[in-house]
Amino acid sequence: MLNFLYRLPAIAFCTLFTFFVTAQPRAKHNLEFDHLAPRWDEAMPLGNGMLGTLVWQKNDRLRLSLDRADLWDERKALDLSKFSFRWVEQQVLKKDYKPVQQLGDWPYDHTPYPTKLPAAALQFNLKDLGAVVSNKLDIATAMNTVVFRSGALFRSYVHATQQAGYFEFENLPATVTHLLIPELEIHNYNSGRSAAENDNSHSGEGLEKLGYAKGTVTAVNNSIRYHQPTYQHHYFEVLVRWTKTGNRLTGAWTISNDEAAVLPASNPTINGQSHRQWWTRFWSQSAVQLPDAAIEKQYYLELYKLGAVSRKGAPAITLQAVWTADNGSLPPWKGDFHNDLNTQLSYWPAYTGNHLQEAATFTDWLWKIRQKNLQYTRQYFEVAGLNVPGVVTLNGDPMGGWIQYSLSPTVGAWCAQHFYWQWKYSMDDVFLKTRAYPYIHDAAVYLEQITRLQHGVRKLPLSSSPEYNDNAITAWFLDWTNYDLALAKFLFTAAAETAAAMKQPAEAARWKQTLAELPAYNVNETGLTVAPGQNMESSHRHFSPYMAIYPLALLDVNRPEDKNILEKSLRHIEAKGTRAWCGYSFSWMASLYARAYQADSALRQLQIFAANFCSSNSFHLNGDQKGGQYSGFTYRPFTLEGNFAFAQGVQELLLQSRQGYAEVFPAVPSGWKNIRFTNLRTEGAFLVSGQMEKGAISSIKIVAEKGGRALFKLPFSKCRILSQQNMQLKQTRNGFVELQGKPGGMVVLGSAN
């Protein structure tokens, strides 16, 4: 057993660990301006996973862009009955790829549907309210407050648990009260004049291209109802209702999909007690305190967005979630589900950040579309099992477009990682039995069947590496890319582990044998290559060749052979530069650096992302907003995955789970001397809190939520127990401690050096 110097008395312990009480975000984390945003992608964002709004100013109107996550046009453009994966392989071998592009790519680019749809905009005339004095988003309560020079105040929020948004004006000047009523602006969905704007956001065609019948707006007393037919007898409705009392106007809005819009019989107060309670619970899950104010603020804004776009029963996070572009156009990339990067990165911070309820919105959605995906796998790949389209509609239909990635053979393996994570971070046996095991099993069955065994080595017929060589025939490789290979290695590893956990030893052995049949990674002087004979030749936005480093964590810097690969790979990425990177590249790169213990480099990526690739409201805009200082991309399409990958990049500096153990303070930047974090989560369902003071780790608290055994790598070679309850410890080797705890067992450790 470990040789501890002494145990602190209870009073000293209580004093030392008062910081572990999780606090709400502070005022310094809020968004606050002295004006209303002049653009939709700089607006104050509010949401509850299903409904969302952006608060900004358009011309002389205060504007609320209204959105609902499941508003979709699901008409099919891609016809999978015309081709298959086997046929694509034949075309590649014949070097005749144009027919493939016409069938697989052309429909996405030339047909406006399927697509996410924006709903409408609620507006108020600002003419007599005076200039804006303050515009604040309080992220602790998810409420926006605007103060005008006239003394009038505007407040709004989207209720955390009800499908309604609320707004209120108070202290209205007498001259304004009778003039200020809500106005509803509807989008141009019929064949009239296009209202599309050229705002450099990479938006698609004007909404009129969808060809819907003109919607109807009915105003009765203090309410407005908008009914918009969409396609094939589908429709949505927007309902706004308000009351005026003296110098106060209070109202609510909602959006329905294929049913009449209904609001509560009476409006709740603008404070919304149950709304506040939800956000209090959300923020109580974890907390961080960093010495870099800009990074800390961006981190909290990212977690706020996670809470605003993830909710039980709502769809998974799309490219823009509940904040679809309000510019008269189809949203960038149709606002769809991109499973070749975007959906996966969006959930990265939810696991370590102890937000498993929010992470479950992804696995819930994937499970919901599972039957469609099983049919897709049988039709397109002509084998049993489960794969997932890389670009997919709300209801699970493939959309096509650059089919190397939109119909990739390994997307299901990447989606399966989130079922694995949800199980490993929660140790929920019911989830393992009913969701993780069957999903991972089906994905492994598919990948086993689609690969071919040649001379004892398993081979994928066609392989690719997002988004290397874009949509050219050269984007296909006849041997494994490291992207596909890493995903295959992960999937069969996870399949063996989940089968063993389900007490299926024969099946576990089957997947271990399949794993053993995979080749080694292709590695040379550049580290991980794209594929055999193909180095990463230039700056590239998608770190697909490096999946084995992160997020799959198959390579471990603490193993000498892996460390060599990591360091060569990172040096090669650095040599190629960042000119072809998007914002999410910098966020992802932070985690790659953190996994190599290169903390200062990781921090630099986070700083560049926050300073150059985000709008004033913290939205990730993909392009470099400082004129191309770090990237040749200077456009501003808003997508969320870069924001959430940023949050995980921060957490990777503080806590990592990898290869059967967790590491505390693995990659602390050299300039960070004072750090605190509370209730971050590791695989095995352990909650960890830590404190660094003046550059020295003063304390680490570990709680075994479900009990069980775990291995931790600590930031000191020897430790002492400061407090202990229902937790046994054993030092196994330098810096490693093995814990065995009962449910709720706890230990607090300090350095004995």
Image: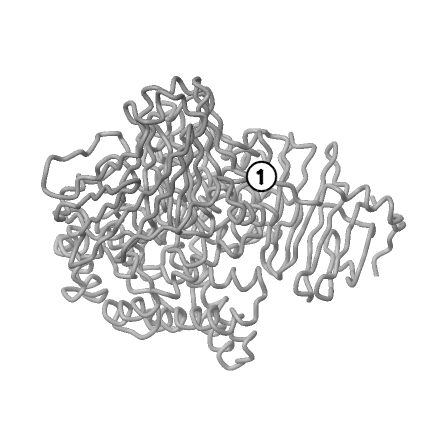
Of residues 285 and 148, the one nearer the viewer is 148
Tag 1, which secondary structure? loop
Counting other residues with Cα less than 10 Å from the Cα at mark 1, is it few (<14), some (14-19), or many (20 or more)? many
Percent coordinates x, y for residue 608 in the rendering:
47, 30
Query: Which residue occupies 39% across, 69% down?
Result: 443
- In the rendered image, the vertical position of residue 240 relative to residue 235, given as above or below: above
How did the renderer colour the structure? one colour
Residue 364 sits in quarter: bottom left
Q: How far across and down, in percent of the image, does residue 544 sit? A: 39, 49
> Count the marks: how many?
1
Residue 581 visible to an observer of this rendering: no
Residue 247 in view (yes/no):
yes
Q: Quadrant of the C terminus?
A: top right
**In the displayed structure image, the side of residue 383 where residue 496 appears, left or right:** right
Residue at the extreme bottom: 506
Residue at coordinates 51% horizontally, 77% vertically from top-left?
A: 509
The answer to which of 33 and 604 lies nearer the viewer is 33
Whether residue 12 sits left or right of residue 279 in the image: it is right
Is 293 placed left or right of 512 in the picture?
Answer: right
Identity, as a three-letter code, of the amino acid under mark 1:
Gln
Please name the residue that numbered disc 1 is placed on: 598
Name the foreground residue: 536 vs 214: 214
Establish if 597 lies above or below 681: above
Rendering coords of residue 269 (x, y %): 48, 42
Specify the quadrant that holds the N terminus. Answer: bottom right
| Residue 429 location, quadrant | bottom right
Side of 442 relative to 13 (left or right): left
Q: Residue 616: percent from the left, percent from the top?
A: 42, 28
Q: Against 478, is 8 above or below?
A: above
Is 726 drawn above or below residue 142 in the view shown?
below
